[in-house]
Amino acid sequence: MGIWPDCFKLIFASFFRAQKIDKPGNASDKARASRPIASALPRRNSVLLLCLPLFLSLSSTTTADEWVYTMQSGDNLWDLSKEHLDNSGNWLKLQKLNNITDPKRIPPGTPIHFPLAWLKIKPAPVRILEFVGEVNVTSSLSGVAIILKPGITLTSGDEIHTGANGNVLLEFLDRSQLLLQKNSHLIIERQNVYGSSGVMETRVRLLRGRVETRVIPAQKNGTRFEIHTPAAITGVRGTDFRVAMAPDLKVGRTEVTHGKVAVSGSTGEAVTVPENSGIVVTVGQPPSPPKPLLLPPDLSLLPNHTTRFPLTFEWPAIEGAELYRAQISHASAAALLVDEAGLVKPQLNPIALPDGDYLLRVRAIDSDGLEGLNTAHKFKLVVPIEPPLLTTPSANTTMQKQPASFHWEAAENSATFHFQLSTRGDFSTLIIDRPDHQKTQLNLENRLEYGDYYWRVASRTTFGKQSAFSPTQQFSLQPQSNLAWMLFFLPLLLLL
C-alpha cells in the first residue's frame, strides 16, 4: 500500500498522543508535560513532518478534482447520476462516496461531491473574435484550410499559423481570451466542459511564437487553463500572463502581470511565478527562479494628439533594458494589434497609420528575454494632407499642342492623386476622372476637341485619405492659325 497507511497512522497517533500530553493526569505525565512537546513526542513521529505535506497535497488535489452540487427539493441521487455521470451505474459509488444512507431522502441543501473523472465530458468550441494580417487555420477534421471570418468557431485539434503581420484573438467558453501574435503556431488541444457542472478544462499547445492571455478567474472549483510548450506547462485559474516559445524550440518564457501561475518544466519541476515576475525554461532543464519584470517605461511626455506621418515616438530608456516591444492597437479594440515591433532603442520606428484613435503599449525586455510591465498611452492621429500645386497647363492659357499633357507638384504625405478634367467649371460633367493616379503627370493618349477645359487634382495618402481639390485651372485648346504656318515657311520662301 506504500507510505500512505503509515502516514495516516502516524498523524492520528500523534494527534492522540498530543492530546494526552496536553492534559496530564499523573505525576509522570506532568513531568513530561513540563518538557517541550517536540521532545515529548516519540522520535518516530518526526516522520509526521514528511507526511503532512503529502496529506495536504492530496487533500488539495481531491478538492480541485471534484464538483460539489447542492441538493434541491425533488432531487434524488439516481436522477442526478443519470444527468451528470458518464456512467449512471456509478450512482452506488457516488452514494458511498458521500456517505448517504437513504438515496431517496436527501435533505435539500446537502452537498454532493462528484469526482470530475466520473462526469460527462462535453467538447466546447473556441471562437475567433477578430484577426488581422496573415492568419491560417487548418481543420483537424478535414485537414484543409478554414475560411476565416470573425465569429467562426474552432474545435480540438485545429491548428493556427500567423505570418509576419498576423495576429488573432480567441475567446473561450468562459470568456477568457488569448491573443496569438505574429509568427506563431498554436494547436487547440482541448476545451471540455464536465457535464452541467460548468467546470472547464482548456489546453492549448504553443509550438512557436508568443501569446498574451487574460483568463477569467475560475467560478467553478476544478476549472483548469493550461498552455503547453516544448519547454514547459503553464497552468492558471485566473490571471493575466504571457507565454513565449523561441523559434529554435529550446527556450520558453512566462511573464505574469496579474495574479500568479504555476510553471512545470519538461523535467517535472514546478515553480510558482508571482505577479510582476517572469521565468525562463530551457528544454530538458528545470525552470529558472522567478525574477522581477522590468519597470514600465515612462510615456507621460508623449502627445495625446499628433500629426506625424509616418508616426514616430520616443521615451526615456529603462535601466536593464536590452530591447523594447511596442504594440499599437485601435483604442476601441485594444486587444487586436495593428502593429507590433521589437525595438533596439527606446523609440518607435516610423510607421504609416491612417487617421484614428490608438493605444500604444510599450515594455522593456531584459537580458534573459523576459518582457517587462506595460505602459499604455492613448493618442489621436490626424494626418495632414494638402492638394498639389498645378503647374502645366497654367491658368487661362491657350494651347495648340495635342494630345494634352498635365503636370503638378506633390504635397507632403501624398502617395497618389485624384485627377479630374471637365468642360464645365463646376465639374458636373467629367471627361476624365482618375481617383488613384500614381504619378505627378498625366499624358493623354487621344486628342481633345477644341474649346475651353477645366482641370484639378487632389492628393491622397497611403490609406486613401483625400485632400481638398486644388484650385481649378482653365485652359483653351485652339487650332494653329494660318499666320503661324506662314511665319514658319517665310524664311524658306526668302531663300528661293
Image (tube, rainbow, N blue to C red):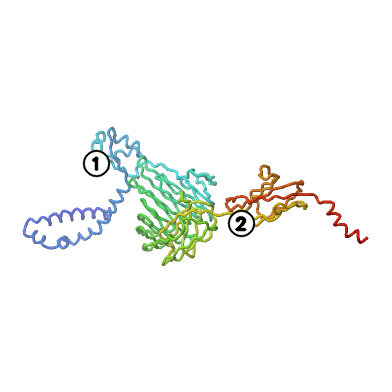
> Do callouts 2 and 1 mark residues in contact (Cβ within 8 Å)?
no
Q: Which dot marks residue 349?
A: none
Question: Which residue is outermost to the left?
Answer: 27
Mark 2 or 1: in front is 2
Residue where numbered disc 1 is placed: 99
Q: What element carries label 1?
A: loop
Which of the two residues, 13 or 316, is positioned nearer the viewer here?
316
- Tell me where residue 412 sits by quadrant: bottom right
Quarter-wise, where is residue 15 in the image? bottom left
At label 1, which amino acid type do we have?
Asn
User: For mark 2, what is the residue?
Assistant: 411
- Image quadrant holding the C terminus, namely bottom right
Q: Callout 2: 10 Å neighbours few (<14), some, many (20+)?
A: some
Compare residues 297 and 412 and report the one nearer the observer. Answer: 412
Place residue 92 in its image quadrant. top left
Residue drawn at point x = 46 percent, y = 56 percent: 304
Q: Position of residue 372 (x, y in %)?
A: 41, 61
Classify 10 Å Cα crowding around label 1: few (below 14), some (14-19), many (20 and above).
few
Compared to 478, does 297 lie above or below?
below
N-terminal-most mark, 2 or 1? 1
Q: Which amino acid does label 2 sit on?
A: Ala
Residue 16 drawn at (x, y percent): 16, 53
Q: Percent x, y for residue 11?
A: 21, 54
Q: In this view, does 66 lie to the left or right of 407?
A: left
- Please report the residue visible at 60 percent of the width from the left and 52 percent of the height from the top: 460
Q: Is residue 283 visible?
A: no
The answer to which of 55 and 465 lies nearer the viewer is 465
Picture layout, residue 177 above or below residue 82: below
User: Which of the two residues, 203 or 338, is positioned nearer the viewer here?
Assistant: 338
